Amino acid sequence: MAGRVFSNLSAILNVWKKDRSTVKKKQNKRMQTKETCPVGLLKNSVVKVFFASRDYNRTRPWETHTKRCTGTGFAISGKRILTNAHVVELLNEHTSVHVKKRGSTIIYKAKVQKIAHECDLAILEIDSQEFWKGMNPLELGGIPPLKKAVIALGYSRGNKLLITKGHVTSFETKQYLHSDTELLRIQIDATIKNGNSGGPVILENKVVGVVYEGSQTQSFLIPTSIVKRFRTGAEESDQQAVFCSLGLSYQSIKNAQIRNHFKMSSKMTGILINKINLWSGAYGILKKNDIILAIDGVPISNDATVPFWGNKRISFNYLISMKKPGETSLIKVLRRGKEHEYIINLKPVKPHVKVQQYYKRPSYYIFGGFVFVSKSDISKCEQQVVISEILADDINQGYESFKDLQVEKVNKVKVKNLRHLSELIEENHIQDLTMDLEDDKVLVLNY
């Protein structure tokens, strides 16, 4: 009896040892998988970006303050780091950019090689062989499918690299931070905090987007199609803008009455041109009240969208924005009831707020306590001039509410730019100096 019991215990012990061995093997396999996980390997290519610069007060340009911030970047081909333009936006003689590798205490000096505010991207160079040891460039993938799970990598706080999971929820075209044109962006349902800007979003070991904006419930990515276009443009040209725009304002024509007014057939769809900018490649070719029916053979719907993926639709601007400056588009329009086709030479995006403001002290002019600055840079000769600040003085008492208004005319003469405004004021020989402001407001100074 005892022998049989011992025999049974021995058998149980052998089974237990075998099971334990199997469990250990599985645990070791899981640990090995975790350690050699592709995402784990990608972490070493993600860096923390440190930025410091002296910023000029936009309303009181003679005042400055030091701006400091941190962001995220990652290695791309050619021993370069990709990050957001807004992370390193203030490029002047006081700018300082540094990067730090994951798990390291060494901070390396970086230089901004290329920056494009219209797509919020920048490329950094680090002149150090030591820095690039163990750093592998991340591979750029394509546009991720809807509802697909993705992983965002970034340094939100401190020196720890955080992993945030989310899902792709939508695609849309929107204006980026410093741009006046619409570019494609991807939305994910992940909470991305400050410091993550410029970090990669990963799907199947490839980068599918760059974080540039976020909130408590959602975050937005720059798709790799934009990244690739920016990178190619940086390698091919020194020009600031690498994206295109038709340079016109328009309205959707979903109302049947307006479509009938412009003699559109029941099968026609499109958008109505309201205005064409002087710098547009379409200026002098397309006209106000033309109906754009199609671009490069792609029909535009009455809500100004075109097909994207499956049953998804996005703004027609996507068709233009991804082309290179100098390329052409075939525009089909309806004009006075007749269809026409025109080849338009595309021109680069013109940012509304001049890019130079991120590089040097802004120009200003003070008269009667009013501080005048240029708001835009349509061309070297044409600027919008606004009252950025009103310094308290008896001469401007009662005009406190005129701050931020554009100056349209001085003594009935249209203001061309900031220098022109100063000349009109300095050369005034009549007792009352009159300024016509926006919203039909009038400013009169007697001096």
Image (cartoon, rainbow, N blue to C red):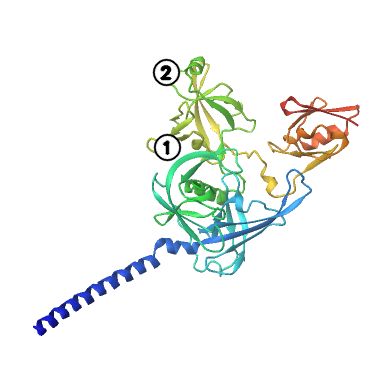
Give the left or right position of residue 33, taking residue 334 as reference: left
Where is 172 relative to 28, above or below?
above
- Residue located at (66% from left, 40% from top): 353
Task: Residue 88 in the image: state x and y as whole percent.
Answer: 63, 54
In this rendering, position of residue 247 left or right of residue 138: right
Q: In the rendered structure, which amino acid carries the disc numbered 1? A: Phe
- Give percent across and percent down for residue 436: 78, 27
Quarter in which the N terminus is drawn: bottom left
x then y, percent, for residue 355 = 66, 44
Query: Mark 1 vs mark 2: which is more N-terminal?
Result: 2
Q: Are marks 1 and 2 in contact (CB under 8 Å)?
A: no
Q: What residue appears at the point 91 percent right and 27 percent down from the top-left corner?
A: 431
Q: Residue at x 46, y 41 (%)?
A: 171
Camera-side residue of 338 and 230: 230
Residue at which label 1 appears: 308
Q: Residue furthest front?
A: 1
Residue wearing tag 2: 266
Q: Position of residue 220 (x, y in %)?
A: 50, 46
Between 238 and 80, the one nearer to me in the picture: 80
Amino acid beneath label 2: Ser
Label 1, label 2: how far apart the Cα atoms are:
23 Å
SS of the residue under disc 2: loop
Check disc 1 and report its element: helix, strand or loop: loop
